[in-house]
């Protein structure tokens, strides 16, 4: 049997397609429009060339799921599930909130519940500065450079607690002025895409304002994944004590917000256990971001019997990266050492990596 049930010749009206094309119906019921009569359609409708849609001023009547039409505004629509939806033809990648992937520090904070990480989207609390903070700033840093193109910022939503203006300093040396920050609404700033490893926002309080801070900060862009491999979540986490249910030891995990606080301890400990052996060569530690509870050093003990003494942990919540040769272990314990003046010591982050 001939491979096609019929062949029908069409003449394209455009001059560039002056040669003859054929309309084909294969034995499999597929329709093809092609310049080669021996071509077999590879889909239910296979067009080797261009397809033209005539723009329509309004949607087609009596639509059915799967129908497509082109509007006179040049927009393409698909009908599905009882509604027309515009088809996005842009090749741009969707923007992600890169603030969640940043190391966040600030010039100051007021109390343990007002750390700079409170600016993350979905957080119920605010970042609040200390009353005597002379130069207010918040700094975001990424371990892997990120491409960003938009910033969203919102003042605290209480009376007389607002920043009026500011300046963004990017790690590539460029700057951007924030001429006027609304008291209640979001400030959205779009700019030409740039790849940076960090940015610092210097903020100017409104004259006479108190308890200033931010309730939201989002830096939007395309996400570049970290080049390091994080270990699987520990199967068990124990601590010497917990201040309250708001400060559990599980808060130190990277996917959690908040921090772990001990109950009245200057030198608490925290231990991580895995059922299966884990291989790592780096540990990231962040002290609680408030300035009153300060862990300045610690001893890390591994299940293989080895240990590392760690000094120089920052008091403002900046990451301390501890590197060492590969170790394969089942548990890790951190014995913390406070500065002798603080109680309720703890940590905001403990992360384990294989670099």
Image (tube, helix red, strand yellow):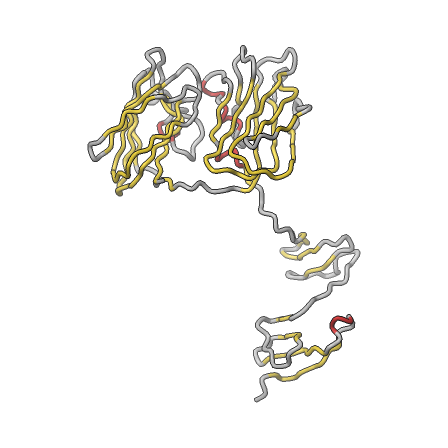
Q: In which quarter of the image is residue 265?
A: top left
> Is 317 above or below relative to 324?
above
Query: As drawn, which residue projects farthest toward the bottom?
Result: 1
Q: Which of 285 and 112 is in front in this view?
A: 285
Give the residue displayed 57% in from the left and 28% down from the top.
216
In the visual, does 180 lie left or right of 217?
A: right
In the visual, does 302 lie left or right of 188?
A: left
Give the number of callouts. 0
Query: As drawn, which residue projects farthest toward the front?
Result: 173
Q: Nearer the viewer, residue 284 or 71?
A: 284
Residue 36: x and y, percent? 64, 79
Give the residue displayed 64% in from the left and 60% down from the top.
65
Give the residue displayed 49% in from the left and 16% down from the top.
110
Q: Which of 309 and 100 is in front in this view?
A: 309
Residue 343: x and y, percent? 35, 14
Query: As drawn, which residue projects farthest toward the left?
Result: 305
> Is 41 above or below relative to 142?
below
Q: Quadrant of the N terminus?
A: bottom right
Q: In which quarter of the image is residue 252?
A: top left
Q: Quadrant of the C terminus?
A: top left
Q: Which of 322 and 305 is in front in this view?
A: 322
Residue 27: x and y, percent? 58, 81
Residue 337: x and y, percent? 30, 19
């Amino acid at each position: 049997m001939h491979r096609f049930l019929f062949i029908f010749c069409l003449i394209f009206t455009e001059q560039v397609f002056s040669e003859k094309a054929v309309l084909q119906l294969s034995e499999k019921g597929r329709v093809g429009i092609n310049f080669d009569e021996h071509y077999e359609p590879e889909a239910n409708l296979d067009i080797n060339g261009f397809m033209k849609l005539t723009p329509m001023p309004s949607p087609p009547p009596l639509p059915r799921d799967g129908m497509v039409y082109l509007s006179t505004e040049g927009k393409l629509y698909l009908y599905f599930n009882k509604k027309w939806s515009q088809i996005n033809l842009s090749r741009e990648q969707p923007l992600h909130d890169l603030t969640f992937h940043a190391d966040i520090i600030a010039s100051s904070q007021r109390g343990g519940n007002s750390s700079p990480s409170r600016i993350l989207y979905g957080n119920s609390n605010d970042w609040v500065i200390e009353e005597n903070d002379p130069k207010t700033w918040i700094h975001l840093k990424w371990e892997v450079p990120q491409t960003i193109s938009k910033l969203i910022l919102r003042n605290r939503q209480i009376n007389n607690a607002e920043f009026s203006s500011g300046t963004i300093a990017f790690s590539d040396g460029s700057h951007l002025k924030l001429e006027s920050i609304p008291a209640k609404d979001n400030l959205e700033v779009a700019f030409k895409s740039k790849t940076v490893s960090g940015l610092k926002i210097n903020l100017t309080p409104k004259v006479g304002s108190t308890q200033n801070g931010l309730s939201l900060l989002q830096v939007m862009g395309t996400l570049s994944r970290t080049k390091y491999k994080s270990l699987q979540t520990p199967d068990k986490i124990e601590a010497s004590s917990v201040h309250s249910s708001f400060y559990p030891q599980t808060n130190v995990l990277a996917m959690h917000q908040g921090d772990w606080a001990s109950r009245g301890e200057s030198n608490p400990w925290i231990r991580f256990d895995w059922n299966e052996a884990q291989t790592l060569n780096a540990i990231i530690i962040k002290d609680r971001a408030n300035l009153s509870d300060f862990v300045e050093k610690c001893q890390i003990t591994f299940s293989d019997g080895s240990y590392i003494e760690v000094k120089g942990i920052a008091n403002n919540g900046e990451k301390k990266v501890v590197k060492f040769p590969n170790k394969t272990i089942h548990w890790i314990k951190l014995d913390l050492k406070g500065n002798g003046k603080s109680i309720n010591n703890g940590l905001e982050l403990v992360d384990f990596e294989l670099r």
